[in-house]
Amino acid sequence: MTPLDPAAISPATGVRTLLYKEVLRFWKVSFQTVAAPVLTAVLYLLIFGHVLEEHVKVYDGVSYTAFLVPGLVMMSVLQNAFANSSSSLIQSKITGNLVFLLVTPLSHRAWFTAYVGASVIRGLLVGLGVFLVTLWFAVPPFAEPWWILVFAALGAGMLGSLGLIAGLWAEKFDQMAAFQNFLIMPMTFLAGVFYSVHSLPAFWQAVSHLNPFFYMIDGFRRGFFGQSDVSPWLSLAIVGASFAVVAAVALHLLKTGYKIRH
């Protein structure tokens, strides 16, 4: 049998294989990685929707429960996209099986594409699950559905890239937990998931406008209601630029082998 020439292997084959491995990694435990986040989002909806339904009105003709749905969907997309790439990388580093990837001829771009691609898939799957379950409680309209697709994809891609950076930087699970608890969670919860920033005092409105997560959620919500706190084009520009910066940093760290090549 003639040995297989590594040079004859298409780079796309390596990307597909690693992407398949990363998708299979979270899908094998989908009860934990997909079903559990859906349940968490539904609990948020039940609690906040029940308590504030009669007391909070954001958009004309839109119930508070319906207003909550897009925010919870996008929050789930972002948190799970981040969790996928960050947890995969830190687990591989700690268990030592990352060496099997390091000896392959995969480029840093292939790593990025596979890890972020799997994160996007997981984020969108969880977001879709949250949306389908919350339809039982409220059915938001689809006023401008193209914004839904654009911001869901960009948001998942950005958080998947940020998860790569966190996974490369962290050397133990405590550091990863700190990154998620003190950066990702606050930025997500303070991005207008449960409220409109117009209801905040002027100072906190200004602070919210410094948070790129706010633009992801506001632009995503625009796709449902045709209403938003800022222009969706401004949101698109800020989210697109943020994604480009975070992706460039992740690619650079992968290329230099930051904390994975010694």
Image (spheres, grey):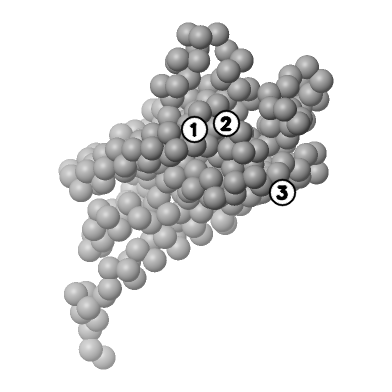
Q: From the image, tell me which residue sits under label 3.
A: 132
First in residue order: circle 1 vs circle 3: 3
Q: Mark 1 falls on what kind of element? A: loop
Measure the alpha-carbon separation of dots 1 and 3. Answer: 27 Å
Residue count near mark 2 (Cα–Cα under 10 Å), binned few <14, some 14–19, many ≥20: some
Quarter of the figure that contains the N terminus? bottom left
Q: Which of the two residues, 94 or 61, is positioned nearer the viewer here?
A: 61
| 206 versus 133 height, above or below | above
Q: Position of residue 188 (x, y in %)?
A: 52, 28
Quadrant in the rendering for residue 68 = top right
Badge 2 marks a residue whose secondary structure is loop
User: Any mark on residue 231, and which?
Assistant: 1
Give the residue drawn at x 45%, y 15%. Answer: 206
Whichever of callouts 2 and 3 sits on the residue coming sooner in the sequence is 3
Q: What residue type is labelled 2?
A: Ser
- Closer to us: 107 or 177: 107
Check disc 2 and report the residue beneath it.
228
